Image (spheres, rainbow, N blue to C red):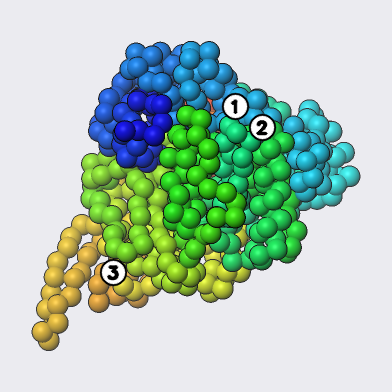
Amino acid sequence: MSETTFTKVLVANRGEIAIRVFRTLREMGIASVAVYSEVDRDALFVEFADEAFLIGPGPASESYLKVDTIIETARRAGAEAIHPGYGFLAENAGFARACAEAGIVFIGPPPEAIDAMGSKIEARALMDRAGVPIVPGVTDPVDTVEDARRIAEDIGYPVAVKAAAGGGGKGFRVALDETRLEEAFEGSRRESEKFFADSVVYLERYLPEPRHVEVQILADTHGECIWLGERDCSVQRRHQKLVEETPSPVVSDDLRTRMGEASVRAAKAVGYVSAGTLEYLVSGEEFFFLEMNTRIQVEHTVTEMCTGLDLIREQVRIAAGAHLPLTQDRVEPRGHAFECRINAEDAEKRFLPAPARITSYREPTGPGVRVDSGVHAGSVIAEIYDPMVAKLIVWDVDRESARRRMLRALGEYVVEGPATLIPFHRWLLNKQEFIDGGACHADLARMSDAPTPLEAPAGPAPALAGDAAPDEAPQVVRELTAEVDGRRYAVRLSGRADQFGGGGAAPVAPKAKKARGGGGGAVSSGDAVVSPMQGTVLKVSAEKGQAVTAGDVLCVVEAMKMENEVAVHRDGVVAEVVAVEGASVESGAVLVKLEPAA
């Protein structure tokens, strides 16, 4: 018999998080309902649910973000509750209110808490009053670039321009000095309007070398709240996380306790209920409030591995009125866990999205290894959704053992078709800075040494996808075995074998080469500035006859929910603007033609 009052729950999401929730619901004896777009008609998550309903075309705005359609589908299916997952409507207070008005339980926090923490400006003010440290800056909206200049001069450069309604790196720009402020300000406003329908931004002092550490909390409807340790999320690209671990290698016991207690104060200050995360910037023994995520996090898995709790289960229980499963004095995390996000991105092309069909797929297994995925062989990583293929999570008794286990699992992971971050993760986990738990926490999309070449260690690495464009042939073209002096070798041949090394016991030495791309992600040459990926032209800032300097951003191309600035690779004059805002372009398509400067 179910321990909750729910008999059926709809999951308003897709991919791996939908499957993650479906699995817990099944264990709890609760029937599950999936919703899917036309693009996801054959997706794996649709098969996992007990029931599934088509809700619209591929674009999220016409399917996964349609509040009325999702509410009506829940009614039609007879679902008493809706779990939003993360992304899409997960932090939409209007959706939470619509659920309540329809008599459907929203498995998450109350809309008032979402509102309070959804506005970064209001959240800063609330945290300040609750005694939670905040980064120097302003709490009022910044309306003009002139206001931004005045504030930046007051608090000092570098400054971060941040979307008031933002999160996940969206609407976040950094201006290192005054010359870059206007571009950062306008870019933040534009991206904020696009993703959150709200162009309000604010400024705060940018801390260039902090650690990004977050604290997981659970709060119920009875006024109880606990914290479940921290997660270090400092390895990022474009201010979005790539690798997470718990515990953080730089957080002392005293700092951990202070952060946990501050997180509980923060949650209680806004009347929070459900699973939530307080994010902080950590510098030495100091920490500063960054934001609160009023939903389950992608990286909740590492906390589960170290605490033994199922956080999705606790969300469902709390939504049904249950008490927390334990008190603070009984929270005893053990061991160490890592999560690597296996995204369809090409790290050698500055982490550009690589949408494609998966032609071969095999997940690693073994002690302490977990994979949360939403794909199989034949699945399509679509351009219009985020690039995540799966999450690879490992646990072991200490950090070094867990690191070695992750390397073993990465070496077993097979994803053929799209380029993925598997080679990048192997490169990263072997860097001495990472091994030491040190300062391997810069924005990796801007690191000059990341990762060209990707010197992955020799060993079983059947999944080393390279940097082919989405429309090229699959990476691996042949597999064979050979015996030499009675010893059997497994050999996997591919177009990138010279770079990443072979498989099994026959490694091929990495071949060094120059980094491709450059400022703004351009991969152009000659007289043409080209699109580095398949996507949609979001903005064109070039004009015919305009004099340009190498590094100037001429276009912005969006793919997989990421804006990619395309910069000119040399000085010259714009001879022709080919790109049209709103148009779809293929990888390598000419955006702007150049001619020599007079």
Q: Position of residue 139 (x, y in %)?
A: 80, 35
User: Which amino acid type corresponds to the residue marked 2 in the rendered image?
Assistant: Gly
- Return the residue at label 1: 110
Q: Image point 66% across, 65% down: which residue?
A: 253
Please, what secondary structure does the residue beneath circle 1 have? loop
Q: Position of residue 44 (x, y in %)?
A: 27, 37
Q: Position of residue 232 (x, y in %)?
A: 58, 57
Q: Image point 49% across, 48% down: which residue?
A: 300
- Return the residue at label 3: 460
The numbered mark, 1 or 3, whose residue comes first in the sequence reads: 1
Vertical placement of residue 156 versus 182, above or below? below
User: Which amino acid type corresponds to the residue marked 3 in the rendered image?
Assistant: Pro
Contact, mark 1 vs mark 3 (Cβ under 8 Å): no
Contact, mark 1 vs mark 2 (Cβ under 8 Å): yes
- Which of pointers 1 and 3 indicates the residue nearer the eye? 1
Q: Image point 25% across, 54% down: which residue?
A: 362
Q: Quadrant of residue 397?
A: bottom left
